[in-house]
Every structure is written in structure tokens, then in C-alpha cells.
Amino acid sequence: MFDYQPSAQCLTNKTLLVTGAGDGIGKQAAIHYAKYGATVILLGRTVAKLEQVYDEIIASGYPEPAIVPLDMKGATPQNYQDMTNTILDQFGKLDGALLNASMLGELTPFANIAKQIWDDVMQVNLNAQFYLAQALIPALAKADSASLVFTTSGVGNKGRAYWGPYSISKFATEGMMQVIADEYEDSAIRTNAINPGATDTKMRQTAFPAEDKRKIASAEDIMPAYIYLMSDDSKEINGQRINAQQAQG
Ligand code: NDP
């Protein structure tokens, strides 16, 4: 596991956006960011799940989060721009964004990939990440030190049979991360990608229905790398692919 012991208030005074914050890894990241002092903006498509995360954060006595209901399948660049303007009006800056939401699509032979599945996966996993990054970068530029984190996968730098659209979308995500990291190298914005590794969530259960869940990490287990990338301790890290389940060095 990635080895990082966060100090209790390492995210204090930070405003952080988490996409896909209602379930799985995004939910745990949102709760942990709040626990370490951040005000978290919870973006997701299922309002009831976002409200549950909101309630959990409030009940724990952490800073009050904000909710942004948005279905990334249908959202337009203007929707992300409007959201960013609201964030700027309310908070004045954005210190970090965890672009975590994505969809698996269907595991199927390449020859059988349906156009609709291809389009949906590319829309959510790639186009929406591009729209989000373009809208958010000016808000991130207003922070003293900002972190933009994309989410990749084990199939994001090594293709795998039957994982077509998802795998290809993650390769492109890593490419986008590298381009932004290179362009903004001399700025206060750092850009990286995190690979969670096998983690017990709905997506994982869909991809590997017969797997023994007790043998893989929980979303909570992998949080050290997620907290590290949002804390100032990762200030010098840029353009990297971070494996949440691998020790560094
Ligand atoms: P889950 O499917 O458990 O959670 C995904 C979250 O994204 C959900 O909250 C979901 O919302 C949200 N989401 C999906 N589609 C949309 C959409 N169109 N608009 C808005 N929100 C949406 O996945 P994980 O937590 O497992 O995955 C998180 C990230 O980690 C993903 O990028 C995934 O590719 C990556 N990953 C996960 C691995 C694993 O083993 N779990 C391994 C490698 C990478 P809702 O709850 O409403 O469905």
C-alpha cells in the first residue's frame, strides 16, 4: 500500500471537488478529505447518494460540503463552466479536483463493441474529463498550490482483451494528464493520475462478479495516496501515475 501518514489538519482551508462522490472510491475520498479539514464539493448523478455523504460528513463534525448534481453523460461544457463560476463565487478558488467518476461500459470482444457503449464510455470517461479540466484550470490557478488528479486503471497503460472502450478511455486520460502536466509545469497547478488498483466497489463487482471481496482492498484502505495527492506534501509531484496500492520507491 502507498505509505503516507497525513497530519490531522493537512487539508484545512482547502476547497476540493470530487466527482462520483456518492459511491465507491469517490465517496470515501470525499469523507476523508473532509475529515482532514477540507470543504468538499460533491459532484455526482444520484442526489440521494450525495445527500447521504453530505449527512455523514456533517454528523462527523467536518466542514459543511456542497452538492453538485450532474449526470456527466449529458452534461455540456457550459454546465461545467457554470459550476466553476458558482465555485468561484462561493469559495474564490479551488485547491484540488479529484476526477474520479467513470463508467465501465461492457466487457466484450472488440469486434462486438456497440457504438452506443463506445460513445457513452468516451463521453463520461474522456470528454467529460476534458470539459471539466478546461473549466476548472482557471479556478485551480487562483489557489497558491493546486492539485488536479485524474483516475486511471491497470488497463490505462496496458491494454487487455475485452476491456475495449474503458481501457482506451483510460489510456487517453493518462495522455491528457501528461499534456496538462507538461503545459503547466511552471505553474502552481500539479497534475497527476491515480490508479486505485483492485478495490471493492460496485464497478469492481460488475467486472469480476465471482471474486472474493475479502481478498481485495476496500476503498478506505487506499485513501493514503488520495489524501497525499491533495495535501501540500505532494507539491513537487507532477505528471506522475501513482499506484494507490504500491509502496513508493
Ligand atoms: P463505482 O462504480 O463504485 O463509483 C463510480 C461513481 O461515479 C459513482 O458514484 C457513480 O454514480 C459515478 N458516476 C458514474 N457515471 C456517472 C455519470 N454519468 N455522471 C456522474 N457520476 C457518475 O466505481 P469505483 O469507485 O470503483 O471507481 C472510481 C474510479 O476508480 C473510476 O474512475 C474507476 O475507473 C477507477 N478504478 C476503479 C477500480 C476498482 O477496482 N474499483 C480499479 C481501477 C480503476 P452513481 O453512484 O450514481 O452510479
Image (cartoon, rainbow, N blue to C red):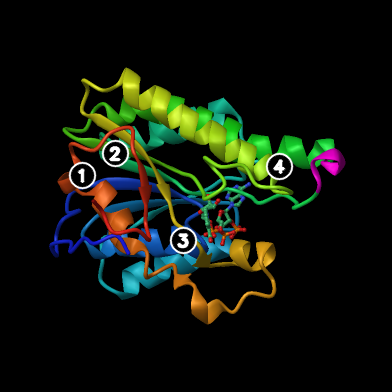
**119 relative to 203 in the view: left or right:** right
The percent position of residue 15, horizontal first and vertical second, equals 28, 46
The answer to the question of whether label 2 and label 4 lie on touching residues, with beta carbons closer than 8 A, is no
**Which numbered disc, 1 or 2, marks the residue that appears first in the sequence?**
2
Q: Which residue is mark 1?
A: 234
The percent position of residue 98, horizontal first and vertical second, equals 40, 46
Query: Between marks 4 and 3, how big is the CA–CA gap?
Result: 22 Å
Query: Between marks 1 and 2, how big is the CA–CA gap?
Result: 9 Å
Which mark is nearer the camera, 3 or 1?
1
The answer as to whether callout 3 falls within 8 Å of ligand 1 is yes
The answer as to whether callout 1 falls within 8 Å of ligand 1 is no
Q: Which mark is residue 147?
A: 2
Query: Between marks 4 and 1, how big is the CA–CA gap?
Result: 32 Å
Number of on-image labels: 4
User: Which residue corresponds to the image point at 38% horizontal and 70% vertical from the top-left?
Assistant: 220
Which mark is nearer the camera, 2 or 4?
4
The answer to the question of whether label 1 and label 2 lie on touching residues, with beta carbons closer than 8 A, is yes
